[in-house]
Image: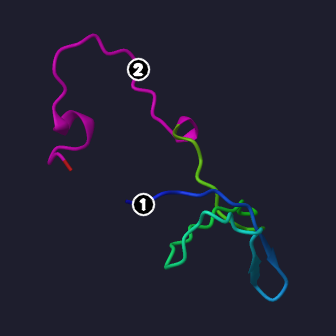
């Protein structure tokens, strides 16, 4: 059975990871490490815009009925 242990550490110069003293009840053996960190937004980095900011067309008034693909796009429906 896997158990989880949350620790805070620091990445030092030279890409060295420093962790605090491990608890004594932690058994010896192989472990998996997952690093969570705050990414700094760099200059020129593309940020996805909200769908609310996407361009849209004004369809005017539509009172129901059916709209065929050809009416929306072109005579050939593409």
How does the figure colour the protein chain or chains? Answer: rainbow
Which residue is more in the foreground, 1 or 74? 1
Was residue 22 drawn as part of the magenta stretch in this picture? Answer: no
Was residue 53 drawn as part of the magenta stretch in this picture? Answer: yes
Where in the figure is residue 35, as x and y percent of width and height? Answer: 62, 67
Q: Is residue 58 above or below residue 27?
A: above
Which residue is more in the foreground, 55 or 38? 38
Check contact, mark 2 vs mark 1: CB within 8 A. no
Q: Quadrant of the N terminus?
A: bottom left
Give the residue pinned by disc 2: 60
Which residue is more in the foreground, 53 or 58? 53
Q: Is 14 positioned to the left or the right of 67 in the image?
A: right
Q: Residue furthest top?
A: 63
Mark 2: give few (<14), some (14-19) or many (20+) Cα within 10 Å: few
Q: Residue at x 17, y 44 (%)?
A: 75
Report the magenta stretch's main SS. loop
Tag 1's secondary structure?
loop
Q: Is residue 50 above or below residue 37?
A: above
Mark 1: give few (<14), some (14-19) or many (20+) Cα within 10 Å: few
Q: Residue at x 50, y 79 (%)?
A: 29
Q: Earlier in the sequence, mark 2 or mark 1?
A: 1
Where in the figure is residue 18, as x and y percent of width and height? Answer: 77, 76
Which residue is more in the foreground, 19 or 43? 19
Where in the figure is residue 43, as x and y percent of width and height? Answer: 78, 67
Q: Is 10 positioned to the left or the right of 55 in the image?
A: right
Give the residue pinned by disc 1: 2
Q: Residue at x 54, y 70 (%)?
A: 27
Q: Which residues are magenta?
A: 52-77
């Amino acid at each position: 059975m896997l158990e989880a242990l949350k620790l805070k550490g620091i990445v030092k110069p030279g890409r060295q990871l420093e962790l605090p003293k491990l608890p004594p009840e932690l058994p010896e053996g192989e472990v998996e490490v997952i690093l969570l960190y705050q990414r700094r937004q760099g200059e020129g980095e593309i940020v996805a815009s909200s769908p609310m900011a996407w361009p849209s067309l004004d369809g005017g008034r539509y009172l129901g009925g059916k709209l065929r693909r050809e009416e929306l796009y072109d005579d050939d429906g593409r």
